Image (cartoon, coloured by chain):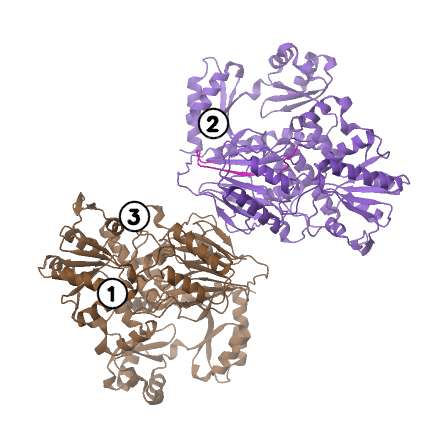
Chain colours: A purple, B brown
């Protein structure tokens, strides 16, 4: 049966089984869901939905027909009239495709009302389904822009969802003896340009599509020259998290003809949008070629289907995806694919942290089923035992207080996302405890990334969630943090006489404000630079870390000048968002079930090999550190 | 530069450097050669050719312009007039595409004449280049048909060669850091449907394309569903030898759109044509589907570029092929690919025998360079030590003489090619020595295959070559051998009261006369069946070997009837054309140079794994028994 025939069959059934007075206006595939539109959606019981879902083995949603929805402007007016002023409604966000309205307010309890009475009043009045949430304390331009794109282009987005739905629901069955394999298109035995390509006889799933920002040639991108790769054949793209080495090329896929879905968590969608735009900006400023434009970024957003942790979705015929918390950065996920009907399960960890951080819960290590685990190996080498977190925090605060005592400035080059927010929490505590008394300047995208963090409290650790929910105690709002808004601000920071701390992107000094600060502050031995994240081979960060005393850098006039490195250089690895070797081994020990095969990627060659060898000793199962362009049969 | 531009450049150069009075009519790529056509080819010295070849790094050939060649009929008349009658010229075979005429005679010495004087006379008279050879003692219909196809379709063949030439000579350079990998599309951890697929960023080389005759579903064919496989992209196909598990699908490639070259030795071309036609015949008779027709077989012949052992040829941009003797069957080869300019070397053994047999020299084990060896593992298991050849021969003769003494018949199911001829040599000796006195009937393609053996004495062992050159001592012409010409003959053999020996194809009783003999002779305990070759899982041969006492077989009326197995069943593994485990290890020990990587295929899973493990212990190099659909990065 074609998707069309399946849909017709479903339509007939829905009409036959619906309550007599229901007015059904449409039944459609939208992404992995079957959506029933009705003029009176309230007539459909949960039981009706459940039974239909069971019989057709598909996810079913009931939505109001657009014709019964009030105009957003009028609906907003009604909401504000119904909700008491004390609730302090900040924003109403209408999603025409789901018929939902998100009501952001300072006191969402008042939007809900006693036993949900206010919500019910709203729904009756406007027909939109109201979703009350707490208004994030820091507004995010990125989220605003994404919402506006999704609203403005809602018709297009609906078309995309329907097209994707038809592709997912084409009637294909995997034979019990079918093959499944994975090609490693990038990020194997290296860090950067991560890209996996799962293949079955019927489907192609790409997981991550990163770039190596430290490379200028085609080694920056995954192996699109792999003979098995064909952009037209991809059924679905999954993004584990927002760092560019995992998602940097996603908009490029759209530029080169992909028009299917991208699955990731909502925070990943927002953070990767932010990073991709930043990547374009920096590259343009530096006159480097960028493989896509902001138009492609927008296109990627429109094709993104956000998934919460733990929700299982069809992403291709006979392939189901579940994302699980990876503990690495906000929204980071382990991608678990269930292939065939109980046939095979393969999970890719993405980047994982297997210890509670200030921001996040540790990575999930238990799965319903698991035959192959593909895991990261960034710190998988025999010697890669990182210092304890507590010690590292103390050391950072020591470097800071000593530098400040000398009257110097501390540069902390950070990934805008993840490490920056972790460090902010450490600095805020240190400042409150009186360990140092100097402002912390946030430059680059850090402020904006922090705003996105506050918009998704449900993705943060329990501890943080509680703090953020009570605005008075939101550490990100501390007076110690100062936003660097523009280059004038930046010049002021550089020129000021007083000591200070500067958190600036990019984390490996591959561009952006951190390079600017380094250029002007490197020459003074009072200053300090502290690396708190992994520095890829080839990056400026790695060179400084290695102890280069003079570094040739391109000036604004296009001439190269040598930067003398006199400032003190520190590396604190204990802040890593990755598991160190101890944690990786602990992760393997706690892993349930034990898979038949373990493949190690995302690390220098020796580290991937060390980890594969350790995993073999642990389980006596097949383990391997594949190379880029290896394609490994899983079953 | 495009191939066209390179060719124009070459043309200009040839014209500039040619002797003043030379009349050059054309310069063309034909396959891997650059062919210069001239009205007076005798003016071009060997030195001229050598220097041109050196400067352009291409193989150069000079040929007479077709207009100066005498009409074949007239030329033949002139040849017969010039050559003395004592030479007994049997056949003149004109190859219009090379301007050569093969003169088959009983005494080629007389065609050559004193110091080549007769040859020179012929050349002057007819312009064709005469190639005197000894007339084969048994005429082969296959060779005749192939020659006739090549002559009749010479214009088409020339077009094909030119098209292939342009593809080979497109100007592509492999970067020094380019990747090279091999996909295993069939015949890994199994026997049957062997198919390798070498890939570089610029080219795709398929080595072997076999079928598993024991399978009825898509497991009979290689994994054409592999995502990296695309029939349009194949640059070249190489066939290691003529058995169907290595070449059975070659005509199918042409049916499904391939139109590039097939490289193999001449005996392989002829033998595989014979086997493919036989395969079609048997399948048609049995009402089984065949994936191609005799038209496709003919098309494959036209696209075949024969190579002698040791000759290195460009087969794709930056890929050179050399075939080496594999010792397995007539014309069998090891395929050695040299990729890039000194970049990488990968050899695939095909099936090998590393001991001198009655027919052939042992396999080549030394190569100029070698980074990866892909080797067969048919008898690679820890227990796969086969009996000595001498012992096995004695045992065979014992079974025969005992069966004959009882008045029974002996069925020897054999591959028509290789084992059959080896056995004929053993039987001829046994008969001569008086060990048995009964006729040996040859049914199926054995007679024809033997004819092809006698046509290529240069591919046989030194010993055999000498015997065949002296017709009086040609063992294949012994009176003990009787050809079974048709079904009437066959009925007579089955019905005769006297004992006899029957050599019949197919070797695994997957069809053909061996099955017919088995059906009628199985029920009598006086008779015997002797398996002398590998029986694949799933074949009738394997079932009998396993000791099944009753076997359901489809009768002519379409009804299944049970065949009672009463005849005595023997298995003599010592005749194998494969290395046993001892020989495989000996081959590895003698191998030069020692490669960086050894991949074991073509054997049941456990045997491939055992051999890979042994190779690892031997060399401490990377070894692996890949699975079908694994794709392994070589560099």
- Please state the extent of the stretch shown in magenta in the rendering: A339-355
The circle on residue B538 is 3
Q: Are marks 1 and 2 in contact (CB under 8 Å)?
A: no
Give the number of callouts.
3
* Chain of residue at mark 2: A
At 70% from the left and 23% from the top, the residue drawn is A466
In the rendered structure, does residue B130 fall within the stretch colored magenta?
no
The circle on residue B393 is 1
Cα–Cα gap, marks 3 and 1: 28 Å
Work out whether residue B176 or residue A303 is closer to the camera in this orientation and state it. B176
Q: Is disc 1 surrounded by few (<14), some (14 to 19) or many (20+) residues within 10 Å?
A: some
Quick check: A160 left or right of B216?
A: right
Between circles 1 and 2, the one closer to the viewer is 1
Compared with A77, A464 (above or below) is: below
Compared with B460, B613 (above or below) is: above
Q: Which residue is mark 2?
A: A58
The circle on residue A5 is none
The mark nearer the N terminus, 3 or 1, is 1
């Amino acid at each position: 049966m074609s998707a069309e025939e399946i849909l017709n069959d479903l339509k007939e059934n829905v009409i036959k089984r619906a309550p007599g007075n229901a007015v059904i206006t449409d039944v459609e595939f939208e992404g992995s869901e079957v959506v029933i539109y009705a003029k009176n959606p309230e007539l459909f019981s949960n039981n009706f939905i459940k039974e239909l879902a069971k019989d057709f083995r598909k996810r079913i949603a009931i939505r109001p027909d657009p014709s019964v929805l009030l105009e957003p402007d009028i609906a907003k007016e009604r909401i504000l009239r119904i909700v008491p002023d004390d609730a302090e409604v900040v924003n109403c966000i209408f999603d025409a495709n789901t018929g939902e309205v998100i009501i952001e307010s300072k006191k969402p309890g008042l939007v809900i009302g006693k036993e949900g009475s206010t919500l019910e009043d709203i729904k009756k009045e406007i027909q939109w389904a109201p979703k009350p949430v707490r208004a994030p304390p820091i507004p995010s331009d990125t989220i605003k822009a994404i919402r506006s794109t999704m609203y403005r282009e809602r018709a297009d987005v609906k078309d995309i969802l329907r097209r994707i739905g038809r592709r997912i629901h084409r009637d294909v069955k995997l034979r019990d003896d079918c093959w499944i394999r994975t090609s490693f298109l990038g990020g194997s035995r290296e860090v950067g340009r991560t890209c996996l390509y799962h293949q079955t006889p019927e489907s192609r799933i790409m997981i991550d599509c990163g770039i190596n920002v430290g490379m200028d040639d085609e080694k920056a991108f995954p192996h699109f020259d792999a003979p098995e790769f064909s952009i037209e054949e991809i059924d679905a793209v999954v993004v584990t998290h927002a760092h560019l080495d995992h998602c940097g090329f996603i908009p490029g896929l759209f530029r080169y003809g992909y028009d299917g879905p991208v699955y990731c968590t909502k925070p990943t969608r927002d953070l990767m949008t932010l990073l991709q735009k930043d990547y374009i900006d920096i590259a343009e400023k530096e006159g480097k070629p960028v493989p896509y434009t902001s138009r492609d970024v927008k296109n990627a957003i429109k094709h993104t289907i956000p998934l919460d942790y733990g929700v299982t979705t069809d992403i291709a015929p006979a392939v189901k995806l579940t994302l699980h918390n990876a503990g690495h950065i906000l929204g980071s996920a382990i991608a678990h694919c269930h292939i065939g009907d109980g046939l095979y399960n393969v999970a890719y960890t993405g980047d994982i942290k297997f210890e509670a951080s200030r921001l996040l819960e540790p990575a999930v290590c238990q799965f319903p089923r698991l035959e192959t685990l593909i895991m990261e190996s960034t710190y998988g080498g025999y010697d890669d035992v990182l210092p304890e977190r507590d010690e590292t925090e103390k050391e950072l605060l020591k470097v800071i207080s000593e530098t400040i005592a000398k009257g110097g400035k501390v540069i902390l080059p950070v990934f805008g996302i993840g490490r920056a927010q972790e460090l902010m929490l450490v600095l805020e505590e240190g400042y409150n405890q009186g360990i140092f008394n100097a402002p912390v300047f946030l430059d680059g995208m850090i402020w904006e990334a922090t705003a996105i963090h506050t918009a998704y409290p449900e993705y943060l650790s329990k501890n943080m969630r509680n703090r953020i929910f009570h605005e008075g105690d939101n550490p990100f709002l501390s007076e110690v943090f100062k936003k660097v808004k523009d280059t004038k601000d930046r010049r002021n920071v550089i020129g000021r006489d007083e000591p200070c701390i500067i958190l600036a992107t990019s984390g490996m000094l591959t561009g952006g404000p951190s390079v600017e600060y380094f250029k002007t502050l490197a020459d003074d031995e009072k200053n300090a630079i502290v690396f708190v994240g992994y520095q890829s081979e080839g990056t400026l960060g790695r060179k400084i870390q290695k102890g280069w005393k003079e570094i040739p850098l391109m000036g604004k006039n296009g001439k190269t000048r040598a930067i003398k490195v006199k400032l003190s250089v520190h590396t604190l690895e204990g802040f890593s968002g990755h598991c160190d070797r101890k944690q990786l081994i602990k992760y393997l020990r706690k892993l349930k079930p034990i898979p038949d095969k373990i493949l190690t990627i995302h690390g220098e060659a020796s580290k991937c090999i060390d980890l594969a060898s350790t995993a073999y000793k642990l389980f006596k199962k097949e383990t391997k550190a594949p190379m880029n362009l290896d394609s490994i049969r899983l079953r």
